[in-house]
Structure formats: C-alpha cells, structure tokens
Image: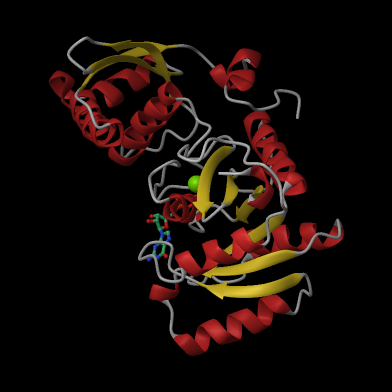
Amino acid sequence: MSEDNTRCGYAAILGAPNAGKSTLVNGLVGTKVSIVSPKVQTTRFRVLGIMMEGATQVILVDTPGIFTPKARIERAMVAAAWEGANDADVICLLVDAKTGWNDDARAIGLRLKSVGLQAVLVLNKVDLVRKEKLLGLATEINSLGIFTDTYMISALSGDGVAELGRDLAARMPEGPLLFPEDQVSDLPQRLLAAEITREKAFLQLHQELPYALAVDTETWEDREDGSVRIDQILYIERESQKSMVVGKGGHQIKSIGEAARLELEGLLERRVHLFLHVKVRGDWTEKRGFYSGIGLDFDA
Ligand code: GDP
Ligand code: MG
C-alpha cells in the first residue's frame, strides 16, 4: 500500500464501567483484543485495538472505566484513561442506553466539556431499550452541547457497528500506517494470554476478587510440533484466598485453566498446554514495578 493514500489516527472509546467499550473494540477490530466481563473494571490498562477500513487504520484506545479514583491503582487507571482521550483524533462517549445518562456517564461528559473537547455520542445496548426511550435519551444527552454526532448501536449483536467504524475511519488524518496492516493489537501475546486467564478467573470466581488477583505469563515455549507451552502465575494477596482459587481437589483452577486454554487455542490457532500456578504476593497494588509493567503511572 503506498503511503500517499493512507490515513491513520486514534479513536478513544470512553464510557462508564460496563458501557460495552471492550465489546465495541472487539467488534470493530473483528476479533477479541480486549477482555469483556459483566463485572466492572476488568480493563486495567490501555489496550489498543487496531482496525483497518480500506486504506485507513484506526487505533482504538480501550480505556479503563473512568470513575472517581480513591486507591492508588484507581488513580493510575483514571490518569491513563484521560491520557488516551487527549491524544485521540476522535473521542467516542459510549453510553449504556439501558442504564441511561447516569452519574458516571455524565461525569465524563462534563469533564470533556470543561476541557473543551468534542465527542461522538454512541448509545449502546439498543437491543435492550425501546425506540421512544432511545430518542428521548439522545435528546437529553445532546443538550450538553459537546456532541457532533449520535450513533445508536448494539456492540453485542453488531448492529450499527460497521457504520460507526466507517465513520471513525473517515475522521482519521492522512498519514502513514503506524502498525502493519494485519496487526490487531499492540498487546504482546503473553500479556493477552494473561488477560484471558484473568478474565476466566473473574467469570468463574463468584466471590469478588476485584484487585486481589493478578496474572503473569512466566514462560512461553514454542514447541517443535507447533504447539505452545504457557506457564502462568496467579498472584493473590492472602493465603486465605488460595482455597477459593484452587477449589476442592484443584477443581476450580482446573476449570479456569480449561476455559482459558480453549480460548487461547482459538486465538492462536494452535494447540496450547497451559499450566497455572497460584502464589501469594502480598499487596501488589502498592508495588511500583507492577504499574510500569502494564503501562500505568504509579505516581498518578
Ligand atoms: P466495558 O466495561 O465498558 O468494557 O464493558 P464490556 O464490553 O466489558 O461489557 C459489559 C457487559 O455488557 C458485558 O456483559 C457485555 O456482554 C454487555 N454488553 C456490551 N454491549 C452490549 C449490547 O450491545 N447489548 C447487550 N445486551 N449487552 C451488551
Ligand atoms: Mg472493558
């Protein structure tokens, strides 16, 4: 592809926790690059999904949900999210149409307005809401006066997603592609593999372990027969959490590993041997190395 007819830029996807940001990024990219879960705040750091639309590359920034930060890790997440917005060529504010214009969504809108940023309003989850309610919601939110356009989509069913993608592409500035055309994420494979295991753990552990669980890919060994052996460590904060993660006779950790392995095999298109180990690491949310390791600012 020659450089003179390409366009490339950044689109930030902002929205309250659970609005559907990760689902939308995955839908736009066409494959899974960001983990999705019904629990809030599963996205801890900026993940780029990279979408090609003709000769245009759109780099999607999937931000941690923006909320009122208290703990250090929350402050770091919020700082990373706003950094994503400032650098973007277009900002999408994704609003869960079912939840409506709640405090979280409004806080993001007001902050955009206060710093003079415009955005595209994307009403998501239209599959859950009646049309009349949608139109009323669109009018209510547009009265903030910062939105250039309004889209109504279902990130889950894919309704309206392709059209949104085309319109985002049209807003990108002319310039050379920043990533190879076939690249879908800037997330290294070992980090993606760790994220997938963390997602499965979140989904399967009914007890809330919001920040208490971290996953690290320790070794990644490509084997001659085309398969890969992956060893991962699940870090927990307290010895008492071990039984919850491991389960009776190891049945819980086995089930997490099985789900993660199946998904990894689908993504990598090869056989995966996944080994999970559980370790107690104390309060890792206060350790500097953890933050720089995943691209967050410890001092935010
Ligand atoms: P994020 O926190 O903003 O990244 O939200 P996620 O993408 O993780 O999605 C949160 C939850 O909403 C998940 O259970 C998704 O399956 C669900 N979800 C996302 N988009 C839609 C949609 O268009 N319709 C419906 N019904 N559910 C959705
Ligand atoms: Mg997310």
Name the spot of residue 82 as percent of width and height, x first: 73, 45
Work out which quarter of the rendered image holds the N terminus and state it: top right
Q: Residue at x 39, y 65 (%)?
A: 158
Q: Is residue 134 above or below residue 293?
A: below
Name the spot of residue 155 as percent of width and height, x first: 43, 62
The one of 212 and 273 positioned closer to us in this rendering: 273
Residue 102, located in which quarter of the rendered image? Answer: bottom right
Q: Is residue 52 above or below residue 271?
A: below
Q: Residue at x 46, y 18 (%)?
A: 237
Q: Is residue 37 left or right of residue 245?
A: right
Name the spot of residue 148 as percent of width and height, x first: 72, 72
Q: Is residue 110 left or right of residue 149?
A: right
Q: Residue at x 48, y 49 (%)?
A: 22
Q: Is residue 34 visible?
A: yes
Name the spot of residue 280 as percent of width and height, x first: 41, 12
Work out which quarter of the rendered image holds the C terminus and state it: top right
